[in-house]
Amino acid sequence: MLPAVLALCATLVLAGTAHGAAFVPAGDGVVLERLPSRSDPAIAELRRQQRALALSERDPRRASLVAQRAIQAARASGDPRFLGQAQAALMPWWNDDDAPAYVVTLRATIKQSLHDFPGALRDLDKLIARDSGNVQAVLTRATILSVTGRYDEARRDCASLAPRVDALVATTCMAGVTGATGDADTAARLLDDALATAGGAADVRVWSETLAGEIAGRRGDAASAEKHFVRALASDATDAYLKGAYADFLLEQRRFATVLALLANETRNDALLLRLALAEKQLPDHAQAFARHRDELAARFEAARRRRDSLHLREEARFVLEIEGDARRALALARANWNMQREPADLRILAAAAEAANDTSARSVVAAWIASTGYRDVALAPARKGN
């Protein structure tokens, strides 16, 4: 996850829309879209900035303010329509290699969020070639490289940042790579040491605490994971990526009631609604809510398929596996997701689906990845052995 202060949005990667034939809903139950609340101050500010931009559409700074606000709205809500609004704001410079650096960085961030990782990297490579001191571009590139499993390149970018950015930023960037490539203990220790030192912007500390919680969870250190997630929430109780990561930890700990309390008001975000439903499934007193949310998720994923977009492939694979119980279809979705991005959560759903489907080929993919990277995760111990 990228800190908002440096990259303007998280690496909570949101799928974009693929254009095709017009979609005609099959019935009244098909969910076409979920409208944001008009009372949300952040949305009201986005609308104000969009009105200002309409008076001066060729002003790159006004356009960037709109794009940044829209990216933040996409991050908070999990709604990819905001990414379309961000792209629309930057459309006059969408193919302009000479656009201002801040426009190119935003453009790359939008492409990343739309799973156009090659396009994002092309933009960032060109930008860094003309301005190697652009730390925001380097950090964004490091994260994309890490998301796609190109760890050696990501490590080089993180190392290059060390003399030029806050120590906590540099440490967290490197810990994201180190924690996924065989030395989670060192990554955890460095993060703990860095977080123990005062300083660092608030949103950077949330990023760092969240990553520390994830690494601790993968190491099997539940007490440390809980500590880091609680600290992060104390700093920002609205961060959707953080809430999803903490909810996953709570689900693993079978703390289902705590998940309900955490996510009770997060039903607009597909990823968070999925985790809420997974908790409700385990609580008999919440059977009616579970059935309602299960059907809502099924409708949302079906609408996404009919629109020919790939909204939250990872979450859909998990829904199909853990709620619908269709291991073969879940594996197909997990494979498609793995072909695009290779974060720890992507490996987990691929491994879970491979095991449920008893698919030797997919198991081999997981085992080979663990062997080649040294990735450590207590939840994947059988896969580590290739069984």
Image (spheres, rainbow, N blue to C red):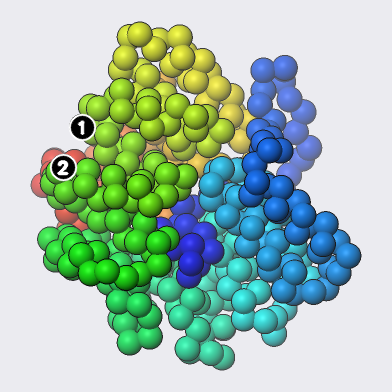
Q: CA distance from mark 2 to mark 1?
A: 8 Å
Q: Quadrant of residue 144?
A: bottom left
Quadrant position of the C terminus in the picture: top left
Which residue is the site of mark 1?
253
Residue at the image position 31 percent from the left and 82 percent from the top? 162
Q: Residue furthest front?
A: 198
Residue at the image position 40 percent from the left and 62 percent from the top? 202
Residue at the image position 31 percent from the left and 28 percent from the top? 258
Residue at the image position 66 percent from the left and 33 percent from the top? 34
Quadrant position of the N terminus in the picture: bottom left
Q: Quadrant of residue 87?
A: bottom right
Residue type indicated by callout 1 = Gln
Against 138, residue 291 (above or below) is above
Element marked by disc 2: helix
Q: Nearer the viewer, residue 166 or 248?
A: 166
Q: Nearer the viewer, residue 246 or 123?
A: 246
